[in-house]
Image (tube, rainbow, N blue to C red):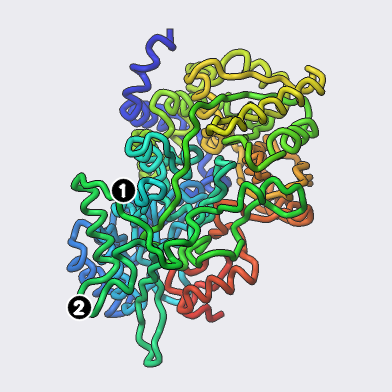
Amino acid sequence: MFSGNKKKIIGSSPVVLVGISLVTGISIGRWSKNDAEQNRVLPNGLPRTCCADEGENLSELQRALPSKLRRVLGPKNVLDGLKRGGSSTILAPYLTGARLGSGGSALCVLTPRSLQEVATCVKLIVDADCVILPQGSNTGLTGGSVPRVVHDGRPVVVISMKYLDSFFPIDGGKRVVCMAGAGLADLSRDIPTWFPDRESHSILGSTFLNPTTAAGVAFGSGGTQLRKGPAYTDRAMYIKVQQNKFGENVVKVVNRLGINGIEDKDFHEGSGNAVDQLEAYQRDVKEGYSRAMVTSSRSPNGQAKAHDTNYATHVCKNNEDVSRYNADCSGLECNRSEGKVLILATVHDTFPSPAHSRHFWISFADLETALAFRREVCLQNAKDLPVSVEYMNRDSFDVIDTAGRGQASIIQLLGVSSPYIKHLWNIKLWIESLPITNSNLWCDQFLYYVNSIFPETLPKRMMESGTAMDHHVAMTVGEFGDGNMKILLDRLHTFASNHDKEKIVIHECQSSSEAQSLTAFRFVAASAFRTWCVGNDGAQGISVDYALPKNGGQIPKLTSVPLKRMRYSHFGCNVVHEDLAYGPNVDVEAAKLQLKRTVEIKKGKLPAEHGHGTEYHAPKPTQKRWKQMDPLNVFNPGVGGLSTNYKYKE
């Protein structure tokens, strides 16, 4: 009965989600124990504070700043953070993190519509003795993309880059230029329409929330694409703030894009600048003109790397190094900058798309067999790597099945890159920000209690092996015209023949819908975990991500036993995400700290791809690098354990 009406039900999901969540959630919320909920730790930030004070602690310059910014951007693009002009529901999406981060305030939130406006606003903000929080789509998971308390009296101004979302191809489609607000989902959808044989760097992972390309570079994201490596580019345009010898603030635009016509040498005094020319290019794109014939400069900037070209070779070396981690200080300073410079635009390589792909669900009886599969099948040769290899343990399987079916069904119906997914996410954030007790729990309570009315996400035969075995891999392989897919699959079949059937079970997807079910199942893991915690009375949840050595992979030991320990990873590069659920009386912060220490003892690195944010203290070399980028500490103060004070004064 349900499957026949599924399209109708889910197709109207914005109305269904809002209406039923409100009614059901209010009823369920009345049962909640408010005192316990207030101290309960859940795997995301809950809005507690949305606005700055009334202005009594602000200087004259700071009080005057919003008016000055309105003259630059227009009234609609300056959201007032003062109580008398602010609104919790309007500001909440900018002040509350996707998973954690809340309680901070902003003097105002800016939504500029041009790069030149950004540069102008930066100068006004720093001259008013305020600090800047650069923000993309605000989908960060470690608190680094939302305001926090700054202890030296400098108010925070959020600059949201989300409307600067243009992108255009260059070099005949081999590369793409992305403004800072360009979304990964938009990029992955549009590039194949321009160039059917090309695809973007990120085509899966968290693209359904449409995070920005700039955030991927700044926070060192990596995702599922084993052949391509983490987000990285040495071709970028970004803003730094320094002081001259007279103590005056100087806003410097660093241009390393390497594009003909917008190199700094192309402009003379009074003839314009690279920012203006880049804006002219992106305006042409919006008006329907192709920029595919724009080419890279012959200067060193135009020859610089626009992705990590050595990654495939690096990831196959079976040694004690980790594949990737956020404290890596290599490359142009925009990489893993975590908001310490303000990225305006980046250049990224595109990649050949496979002529055809095959998709597998592989279950293992034990972790040792799964790790052997990774070494002997997936990482034998850099030339025939799988497209993606995603691991899930038994707890991940169970939590997704018992709390994630609704979300997975929507993703299957609409598609991973559908803009409607982001709209639904924004509706959920809006409901959670309502000034009503426990409104932050309603949607997840509703999704948990109606989970069973949705169909199982995976095909029946895969569900059977999922419940019978404890370790699972969703693998995609592709044919790129070199015959290497066959070589990889031959290794897979040889590996399977050398192991008992009780050790490994292989299912190949027989249709595109089955392949989509694997994608949906894996990529609702994090959201399903929160839903599971909310749905189980009193359960608390914490999340950690880390990279283990390439020759490792054994599970770090815990001193306290969780209710659920979800371990899901980008298996090829050994980057692990752990979501741990504990009972109501457990000190979950102590449990998190213990896990982090255990990972470090095993020579792992934390974090691996979501940024340090407020969750992790960055190592001294990384902190030193950030201080050199931002000597005045005006961008994203407090990130990675740094001081929030002017010039990092303690």
Disc on res. 270: 2
**Residue at the top extreme?**
1
Locate residue 585, reporting x and y percent.
67, 44
Locate residue 333, reporting x and y percent.
50, 67
Locate residue 614, reporting x and y percent.
55, 60
Vertical placement of residue 67 versus 93, above or below: below
Q: Residues within 10 Å of mark 2 (few under 14, many from 20)?
A: few
Amino acid carrying label 1: it is: Ala
Q: Secondary structure at mark 1?
A: loop
Q: Secondary structure at mark 2?
A: loop
Vertical placement of residue 15 versus 272, above or below: above
Vertical placement of residue 474 versus 171, above or below: above
Disc 2 to disc 1: CB gap under 8 Å: no
Which marked residue is nearer to the observer: mark 2 or mark 1?
A: 1
**What residue is shown at x 56% (from left), y 52% (from top)?**
309
Amino acid carrying label 2: it is: Gly
Residue 380 visible here? yes
Residue 90 visible here? no
Quote the CA–CA distance across marks 2 and 1.
28 Å
The earlier-in-sequence mark between 2 and 1 is 2
Disc on res. 292: 1
Locate residue 367, reporting x and y percent.
77, 33
Q: Nearer the viewer, residue 533 or 273?
A: 273
Q: Is residue 7 left or right of residue 393?
A: left
**What residue is shown at x 81% (from left), y 22% (from top)?**
499
